[in-house]
């Protein structure tokens, strides 16, 4: 029986996907419970502030998955080439680079904290400082989770990438119950959880990666791969994580941005559902621009599993929107507007789940044709919202259109790329 299962799962996608699935969904449960605690204990105004600040963290932290992809990609190549000890050279290089970026950013955030608080209609700049400091810590997490992912050390990688969620839940619940129901404490718990996850990631790399004398060979330049990946993921992040932040800017009424924040939290699960599959798929389809029949099979299965999960979740949330509102926010009698917002945001967000799968496949394959379409879709989204923001529904329609267009564009790119042929220009990025 086990031999038959092993032959069915030759690429290890299901086995490794299940490992990541367990840890990721444990983190998802922790994330769910965190929003249950915050959604029930915080006022609608405070919860709206919390979600908008978490949206900022996601907006800028998500593109840093480019760094995780870069480290995973090149770590895998080092391992395949028998150069595991060179991974530490690459890791140190990126730590130094990030320090040169994050320190000035922290100083700028401190200087302009008042301006940022005013833009989001916040009463105190302390929330801005905590948000920025948390964000800067999260910038370093992808370095270590990327190395662990490239080495297929999925347990260590999953704990590093998701451990902060459990810590955030426990500490956030304590602070809110023991002191005050404030967005400030939720953000502080997020920051402390990120610091602890970073420590776990450092420990995991030191434990897992084989040390020894370096190969003496030059480290391949990762700059272009990282920068193009960064642009790609930034565009995707603008599509996925900007909605609550934009609503907070354009709508100052608590009923508007508060209700939308709740719908956005529920809708974003559409993308989070497929993350375990993406993480397990990435190292299995790494190439220098060519994709084989094995890669095609892995991608097809990843798309199928993801489509089933996302479609099922969207249908359930459409038929029974009152259930997530009750579970998450203790809203036993949601208004018709609240339920309609849940339906709308879920369907607007759903295509991004498949966009996420397709984008990561292209990045793993060293093909970057997806970058320009995603940048265009993100630009159209922001431009559309700037023109049409007289109502929440105008913003949702713009969001849904941009989301759907991104999925269609990446599917077209996928079908245009012949199997077994190196993508044009991909050799220049190695």
Image (spheres, rainbow, N blue to C red):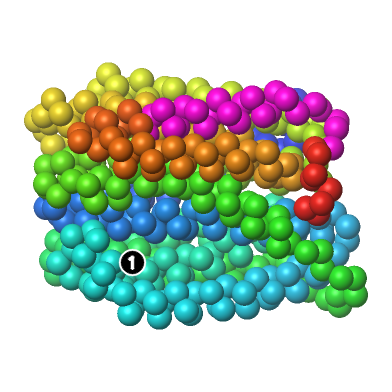
Left or right of 402, for residue 48: left
* Res. 80 image quadrant: bottom right
Quadrant (top left/top right/bottom left/bottom right) for the N terminus: top right
Q: Which residue in the rendered view is the most extreme toward the front?
A: 387
- 285 w.r.t. 322: above or below: below
Q: Which residue is rendered at x = 44% and y = 37% of the image?
A: 380
Q: Which residue is rendered at x = 62% and y = 26% of the image?
A: 411
The residue pinned by badge 1 equals: 131
User: Residue 170 at what x, y percent from top left?
Assistant: 30, 61
Q: How many marks?
A: 1
- 221 w.r.t. 288: above or below: below
User: Residue 369 at what x, y percent from top left?
Assistant: 68, 38
- 66 w.r.t. 11: above or below: below
* Closest to the observer, 59 or 252: 252
Binning the other alpha carbons within 10 Å of mark 1 as few (below 14), some (14 to 19) or many (20 upward) gives many
Quadrant (top left/top right/bottom left/bottom right) for the C terminus: bottom right
Q: Quick check: is 417 in the magenta stretch?
A: yes
Q: Which residue is rendered at x = 13% and y = 37% of the image?
A: 331
């Amino acid at each position: 029986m086990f031999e038959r299962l092993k032959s069915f799962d030759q690429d290890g996608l299901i086995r490794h996907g299940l490992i990541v699935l367990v840890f990721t969904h444990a983190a998802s449960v922790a994330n769910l419970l965190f929003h249950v605690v915050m959604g029930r204990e915080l006022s609608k105004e405070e919860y709206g502030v919390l979600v908008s600040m978490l949206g900022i963290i996601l907006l800028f932290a998500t593109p840093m998955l480019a760094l995780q992809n870069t480290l995973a990609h090149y770590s895998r190549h080092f391992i395949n080439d028998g150069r595991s000890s060179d991974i530490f050279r690459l890791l140190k290089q990126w730590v130094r680079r990030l320090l040169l970026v994050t320190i000035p950013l922290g100083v700028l955030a401190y200087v302009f904290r008042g301006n940022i608080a005013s833009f989001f209609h916040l009463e105190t700049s302390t929330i801005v400082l905590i948000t920025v400091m948390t964000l800067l810590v999260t910038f370093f997490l992808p370095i270590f989770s990327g190395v662990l992912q490239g080495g297929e050390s999925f347990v260590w990688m999953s704990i590093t990438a998701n451990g902060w969620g459990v810590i955030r839940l426990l500490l956030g619940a304590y602070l809110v119950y023991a002191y005050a129901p404030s967005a400030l404490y939720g953000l502080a718990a997020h920051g402390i959880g990120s610091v602890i996850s970073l420590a776990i990631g450092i420990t995991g790399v030191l434990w897992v990666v084989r040390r020894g004398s370096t190969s003496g060979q030059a480290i391949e330049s990762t700059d272009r791969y990282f920068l193009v990946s960064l642009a790609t993921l930034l565009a995707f992040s603008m599509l996925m994580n900007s909605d609550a932040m934009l609503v907070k800017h354009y709508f100052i009424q608590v009923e508007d941005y508060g209700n939308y924040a709740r719908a956005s939290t529920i809708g974003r699960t559409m993308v989070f559902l497929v993350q375990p599959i993406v993480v397990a798929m990435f190292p299995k389809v790494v190439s220098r621009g060519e994709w084989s029949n094995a890669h095609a099979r892995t991608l097809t299965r990843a798309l199928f599993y993801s489509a089933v999960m996302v479609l099922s979740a969207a249908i359930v949330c459409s038929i029974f929107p009152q259930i997530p509102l009750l579970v998450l926010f203790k809203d036993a009698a949601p208004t018709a507007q609240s339920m309609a917002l849940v339906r709308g945001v879920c369907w607007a967000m759903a295509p991004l789940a498949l966009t996420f799968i397709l984008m990561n496949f292209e990045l793993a394959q060293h093909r970057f044709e997806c970058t320009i379409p995603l940048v265009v879709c993100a630009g159209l989204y922001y431009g559309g919202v700037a023109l049409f923001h007289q109502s929440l529904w105008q913003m949702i329609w713009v969001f849904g259109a941009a989301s759907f267009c991104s999925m269609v564009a990446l599917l077209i790119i996928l079908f245009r790329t012949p199997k077994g042929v190196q993508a044009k220009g991909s050799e220049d990025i190695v």
